[in-house]
Image: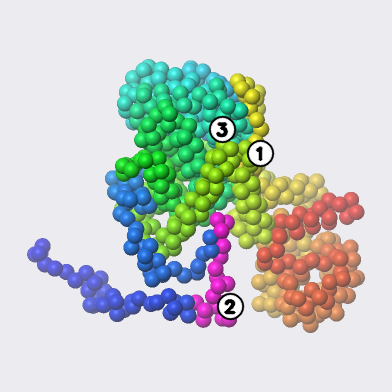
Amino acid sequence: MDLKTEFNTEKLMTGKNINIEKEFPQESFDVWKEKVIKDLKGKPFDSLKTETYEGITLSPLYDFEGTKKLIEKIPYPSQINFRRGFKASGYSLKDWEIAQGIYLTSPKAFNETALHDLRERINSVSVKINGLNGKLLRDKFSLQVKSYNDFKTAFHGIDFSRAPAHLAFSSDYIKFYDYLNRFSDEEKISAENFRGSFTADPISTFITAGKLPQSELNDDSLKFADYVKVMSERFPPARTIGVDASIYGAAGANAVHELAFAIATGVEYFNFLNNKLSNETIAKKIKFSFSIGANFFMEITKLRAFRILWDSVLAGFGIKEKIQRVLVEVRSSQFTQTFTEPYSNMLRVTTEAMAGVIGGADLIHVAPFNVGFEIPDEFSRRIAANVQIIIREETSVREVIDAAAGSYYVETLTDELVSKAWTLFQSIEENGGMIKSLKKGIPQKLIAEVRERKITDLKKRKLSLIGTNVYVKNSGEIPEEVQPEKTADTAFTNSWDEIEPFDFSRASEIFEELLKSVNNYAMEHGNFPGVEGIAVGKISDYKPRADFSRALFETAAFKMNLTPFENLRDAEETVRKSSRKIILLASTDKIYLDSISQLKNLIASNKTKTFVIAGRPPEVVSELQNFKNLHFIFAGMNVYDFLKKLFETKFLSKENV
């Protein structure tokens, strides 16, 4: 074969010459809009617009013309504002770190498992450490280190120059510096080759402990500035300043909150440390941690927006040299974990990890599916690590330097996130910075408002959580949340003030508590709450609403029996004889209206039973509004409140027992 022969690739693939521009002409926005409006069959185009929890209105269509000016300004990777990542080569020359947790509090058990996992599947270890100063960090799987012997036992055999370790200290920072110093000497690890992060993040500690020291970052139990200074001198490559913004995600924050509070915390540390260290040194010592949730594109853009925002912050401190100055870690969202269908967590964290990779994270921590309710075992840790290994080895994502670049949607969303996060950051600065804002309860209030919106949407099933409010498969047993070990409260060396706490409970907990109550009832009475389903008409008449009703009731483990009838009159005897306290009627609006007299008689003659009609036709609601034992179920209703009240009044109330 003549290697100089030129091939027509298009012809080779299709067997004929094709003209791309002719075969696939570029359509204008108006043409696409017309097609969408046609498919909407009378609904307005704007009805497809949606608003995110960040207050951003999403359009159903994004096109080149609308984003042309933005797209033309996008830099290459590693250039200008790092929008497209810190590295020009992406992951093609160096992968992200598979930084998994070990989840064992005992130093000896931690060491054995860490060495095993490092040999088998991971290349980095991520762990939070509680020290001598009590249970300041309320983390149920934090490593308990009370002495140097504990520290050496936990990390013996782990070469910090080869396998990066990411240690987050809750307090006693200087003490841990001593441990690291001694450990490097005894293990013969060159301080110049230390890899990883050994971070102090006092603001994160304040938030998880719910306290602030009166002397703030100068508190004797922290000695934050001293720690960063001596670590910078002794272990130059190590990252020593942590900014854990994932705690805001765990509390239900939106992406704007995470971004704004993260950079506000970074600025707080700059302002506190710059009389001991140069701004350039501080910039090179910071590591940021973010949570990654289920909103795939929002999480990708959050990481892109962060790099732009942080570059602006550094410019404000006079740092202009274009080097990678920050390490970015992402962690699976705690807020979206579910216990009722724990294996669905595997799928959830896969999407989250992929968003982290496309967003350009430096290290990724995937949560095992069972981390909330038991100590992750070999199987669950292996699956969590394999999520990243599969993404790395089988998706070819490393071969594309920036997979999200040029996406009209992603690039537009990135700019909108940057704008909103910067505005909130400025507001935090106007209130005196992050610590003073925490004292005033500003972040707490903002996050609580968004959290409440998310919980309300979860109750209404506008926000879906597989295994919690949709596709619920109740096994009858719902595990209890693992609680932190009970230890004596921190012996603070100075007086610490209480701050308004954050709510770190998972979104699914309210549904799980309802299921537990129903399960307890079933164990006591020998059966689950029952629903007598009455389907009227042809199968095409009742099936959509019958399926909707069954799924709704199964959210609280109510068991529905469905019997079809040609008309409502034929169902009267079944309703009268049924021992079930709830009667579900499923059919069309027309059949309801045509049978309104029978409906009234049926409901009136069975006053001890509660009737539920699937659907909410206005005429039927008007006709039956005087019946107190009647409810309507429909898409967008508050499913949780309805089921909870129904269960309590029909099955727990003494009047109905």
Residue 338 visible somewhere in the drawing: no
- Residue type, mark 1 in image: Glu
Disc 2 target residue: 43
Q: Is residue 459 above or below residue 329?
A: below
Front-most of residues 240 and 509: 240
| In this rendering, position of residue 322 left or right of residue 505 | left
Q: Is residue 20 above or below residue 443?
A: below
| In this rendering, position of residue 439 left or right of residue 287 | right
Q: Are marks 3 and 1 in contact (CB under 8 Å)?
A: no
Please, what secondary structure does the residue beneath circle 3 have? helix
- Residue type, mark 2 in image: Lys
The reply to whether the magenta stretch includes residue 100 is: no
Front-most of residues 527 and 82: 82
Pinpoint residue 450: horizontal percent, then vertical percent: 62, 52
> How many numbered badges does the structure rendering display?
3
- Residue at left offset 61%, top offset 22%: 494
Dot 2 or dot 1, earlier in sequence:
2
Task: Tell me, for residue 205, which label it has, or none.
Answer: 3
The reply to whether the magenta stretch includes residue 51 is: yes
Please, what secondary structure does the residue beneath circle 2 have? loop
Disc 1 target residue: 500
Q: CA distance from mark 2 to mark 1?
A: 45 Å
